[in-house]
């Protein structure tokens, strides 16, 4: 960091370097902030005159990636419920199968397999848990920065988040997976992110149908919940596959292999949530529906259980870091 | 193996900005091009990998430059720093072509940004490379690869055959083997001899052992020597180099920008005898840092110490090495191995001479000393608030002035006055034609870019005729 602060050649790349320059000394909290502000594009690594094999051996993206991973653990709460992704998946599947108890039903009658009440109760509890866990993590992260929220900063940060502005690199795209500039990662992340949002929107509208309009699932193919879910589902197929393919080609000089299980399990759970969901949609009129429903809900439950402890939190802390960066920038 | 021959229409010796500008231009003129870079890929680009910006003429604000910077002002700046040691025709070519060169670079993947924080006074005159010089070189090499330019790394030119001013062939060391290369024309863009300590000793004597080379260890000046021995006319003072005062703890080579120290004007500088030797506040630091390398080089053992107190902390760019800190001047002297009583006396005398004034480190303020020799003309404040801080200073060599003479087509001029038909030079190796002495930030990159393109164009033309 001292080397970076004395050099400053990278300050045009992303939000990390201006944030670094606003400080002379770096507390662990500062480092966690910078680490979560970093989008891990490695532009600064390739441009660094002090990168290995130079004796200074500066490798900002890798260093920040390692700090970032530790920060996920540090801010997570409650830590006691931290589950490995495969345990979470197993628990999710077992729970769903127990609920389904091998029942089958004709005509896409999901609630004949798992009652609506059981479904809502299970996911409701998990959702409340996720919400509390994320809020706790966010509060722990934010408490260390001591900034007051400002609306303008929120707007700026939101725009940075929705466009992944820090991966734009002046329009050329980031240096991921290798030294060449490319928009690939940004696009696949958009597929994933907006896919996730659409699926969320699908669930929300379905809940509205159920409770407000009194319409019971299954909904028609042209209905809003199914349309949103299908679109989002495709996003969550394309996005994760792309991100995984890019990740496999990632320059080993920058990658932190310790994080592979976390990254890959998140990508895999997103992908399989979507895959099983789409299969369920297509085969919902068949006898396979019962099992598919159980598997789909099991995978989704597994995904949800890992959210507060897995890669998903990058979105929480990065968003908070972007808000803080926007506040700091505005103050200048 | 061992008998393979490297052939190409145009051979480029060197791998920095000038070399790659020449290579790209020649290739786009339709000839085959081979680049011989003596460094390995990780350290390619010579001193260009350490640069930040290029100085550009412009008549109106651009996306990265403010206000305007006219040809006449640009040339006046050059006259001022060189004291007239320049070639006006060549200088005006560089200045007039500078905006075209920057625009051309953009079309070849080079990206610019507004000036960096902490580099006041340059946002009007200098266009900064986004990510700095290594990013620039990455863009150049990516463009070269796209266009089918052959780049050989670890390829150090060891011999050149020049007959009657005409380049015939040469030898390059590749993986410990001598390989001959032939081309219809040759562009030399291989820099100066600033990392050749033996050569520097010829001019500086044993003092050169204490110099630190700020840039690449690969600028040994071998090709420069080969050319001069092969009958090329020289320009520039062979004994002079551009040296700045940098942190004495910097690595011997390749420390680059981070080894700079910007605190000199904020305190006093003493030598090993704990004596001051020059006006630390003569002018704004960007205008003075370049003379301090020489000043330190003239002191015993080529070392000096910048001494400040905690009042001025945070008023200069942070440096990569932490300051030596002490509760008293005597203690600080002891940690540097300076005579404590002497340093205390020097500081006492300095403090006594400080006249009252309004301190402002951003302009030439009225804080000066009275009756002190040497005086401190600006930013003189008593050094009296502990803890006291110190940084060791050493001369850091940036570049050398000796080069080969060229004409407006970048053709190397021979001692008999004739211009070589197929031997061209660009970049630092010919910068002495324009920058005979002194220094103007970002001019080296402009000379390299403009003359690189000229050399590439003319080398291709020579190869095609």
Image: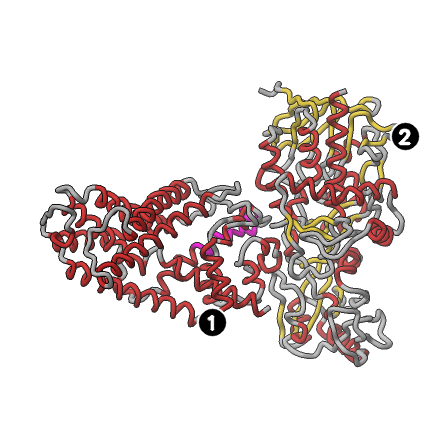
* Magenta stretch, residue numbers: A51-65
- Left or right: B206, with B218 as reference point: right
Pointer 1 and pointer 2: residues touching (CB < 8 Å)? Answer: no
- Whether callout 1 and callout 2 share a subunit is answered no
Q: Nearer the viewer, residue B280 or A274?
A: A274
**A224, above or below B375, in the image:** above
Q: Nearer the viewer, residue B238 or B403?
A: B403
Q: CA distance from mark 1 to mark 2?
A: 72 Å
Q: Quadrant of residue B422?
A: top right
**What kind of secondary structure does the magenta stretch mostly adopt?**
loop
| Residue that numbered label 1 is attached to | A149
Q: What residue is shown at x 65% (from left), y 34% (from top)?
A: B37
Q: Quadrant of residue B357?
A: bottom right
x then y, percent, for residue B380: 77, 74
x then y, percent, for residue B152: 61, 30
Location of the C terminus of chain B (image quadrant)? top right
Q: Which mark is residue B417?
A: 2
x then y, percent, for residue B306: 71, 66
Location of the N terminus of chain B (image quadrant)? top right
């Amino acid at each position: 960091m001292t080397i970076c602060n004395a050099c400053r050649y990278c300050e045009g790349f992303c939000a990390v370097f201006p944030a670094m320059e606003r400080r002379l000394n770096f507390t662990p909290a500062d480092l966690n902030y910078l680490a979560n502000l970093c989008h891990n594009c490695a532009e600064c690594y390739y441009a660094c005159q002090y990168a290995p094999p130079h004796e200074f051996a500066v490798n900002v993206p890798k260093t920040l990636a390692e700090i970032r991973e530790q920060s996920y653990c540090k801010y997570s709460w409650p830590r006691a419920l931290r589950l490995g992704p495969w345990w979470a998946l197993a628990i999710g599947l077992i729970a769903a199968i127990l609920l389904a108890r091998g029942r089958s039903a004709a005509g896409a009658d999901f609630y004949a397999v798992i009652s609506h009440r059981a479904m809502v109760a299970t996911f409701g509890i998990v959702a409340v848990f996720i919400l509390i866990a994320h809020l706790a993590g966010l509060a722990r992260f934010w408490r260390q920065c001591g900034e007051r929220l400002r609306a303008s900063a929120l707007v700026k940060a939101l725009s940075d988040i929705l466009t992944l502005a820090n991966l734009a690199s002046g329009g050329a795209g980031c240096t991921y997976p290798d030294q060449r500039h490319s928009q690939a990662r940004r696009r696949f992340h958009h597929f994933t992110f907006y896919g996730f949002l659409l699926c969320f929107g699908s669930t929300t509208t379905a809940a509205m149908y159920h409770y407000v309009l009194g319409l019971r699932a299954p909904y028609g193919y042209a209905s809003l919940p199914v349309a949103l879910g299908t679109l989002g589902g495709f996003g969550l197929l394309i996005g994760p596959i792309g991100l995984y393919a890019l990740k496999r080609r990632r320059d080993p000089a920058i990658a932190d292999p310790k994080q592979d299980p976390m990254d890959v399990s998140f990508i895999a759970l997103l992908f399989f949530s979507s895959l099983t969901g789409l299969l369920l949609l297509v085969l919902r009129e068949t006898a396979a529906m019962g099992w598919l429903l159980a598997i789909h809900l099991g995978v989704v439950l597994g995904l949800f259980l890992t959210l507060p402890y897995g890669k998903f939190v990058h979105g929480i802390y990065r968003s908070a870091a972007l808000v803080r960066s926007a506040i700091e920038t505005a103050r200048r | 193996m061992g008998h393979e021959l490297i052939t190409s229409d145009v051979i480029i010796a060197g791998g920095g900005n000038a070399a790659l500008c020449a290579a790209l231009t020649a290739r786009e003129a339709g000839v085959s091009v081979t680049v011989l870079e003596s460094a390995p890929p990780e350290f390619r680009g010579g001193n260009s990998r350490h640069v930040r910006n290029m100085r550009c003429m412009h008549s109106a604000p651009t996306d990265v430059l403010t206000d305007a910077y006219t040809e006449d002002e640009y040339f006046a700046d050059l006259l001022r720093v060189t004291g007239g040691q320049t070639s006006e025709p060549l200088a005006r070519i560089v200045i007039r072509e500078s905006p075209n060169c920057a625009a051309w670079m953009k079309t070849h993947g080079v990206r610019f940004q507004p000036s960096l924080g902490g580099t006041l006074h340059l946002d009007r005159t200098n266009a900064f490379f986004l990510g700095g010089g290594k990013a620039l070189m990455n863009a150049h090499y990516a463009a070269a690869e796209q266009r089918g330019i052959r780049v050989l790394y670890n390829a150090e030119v060891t011999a050149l055959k020049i007959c009657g001013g005409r380049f015939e062939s040469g030898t390059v060391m590749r993986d410990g083997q001598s390989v001959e290369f032939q081309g219809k024309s040759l562009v030399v863009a291989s820099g100066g001899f600033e990392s050749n300590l033996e050569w520097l000793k010829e001019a500086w004597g044993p003092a050169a052992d204490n110099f630190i080379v700020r840039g690449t260890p690969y600028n040994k000046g071998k090709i420069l020597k080969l050319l001069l021995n092969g009958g090329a006319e020289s320009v520039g003072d062979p004994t002079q180099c551009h040296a700045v005062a940098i942190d004495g703890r910097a690595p011997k080579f390749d420390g680059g920008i981070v080894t700079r120290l910007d605190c000199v004007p904020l305190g006093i500088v003493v030598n090993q005898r704990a004596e001051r030797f020059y006006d630390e506040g003569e002018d704004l630091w960007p205008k003075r840092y370049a003379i301090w390398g020489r000043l330190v080089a003239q002191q015993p053992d080529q070392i000096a110490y910048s001494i400040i107190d905690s009042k001025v902390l945070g008023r200069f760019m942070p440096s990569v090495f932490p300051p030596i800190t002490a509760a008293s001047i005597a203690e600080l002297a002891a940690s540097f191995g300076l005579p404590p009583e002497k340093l205390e006396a020097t500081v006492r005398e300095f403090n006594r001479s400080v006249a009252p004034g309004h301190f402002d480190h951003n302009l030439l303020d009225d804080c000066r000393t009275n009756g002190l020799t040497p005086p401190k003309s600006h930013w003189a404040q008593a050094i009296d608030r502990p803890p006291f801080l110190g940084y060791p200073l050493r001369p850091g060599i940036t570049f050398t002035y000796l080069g080969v003479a060229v004409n407006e087509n970048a053709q190397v001029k021979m001692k008999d006055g004739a211009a070589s038909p197929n031997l061209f030079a660009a970049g630092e190796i010919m910068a002495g034609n324009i920058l005979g002495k002194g220094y103007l930030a970002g001019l080296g990159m402009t000379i390299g870019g403009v003359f690189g393109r000229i050399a590439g164009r003319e080398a291709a033309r020579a190869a095609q005729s």
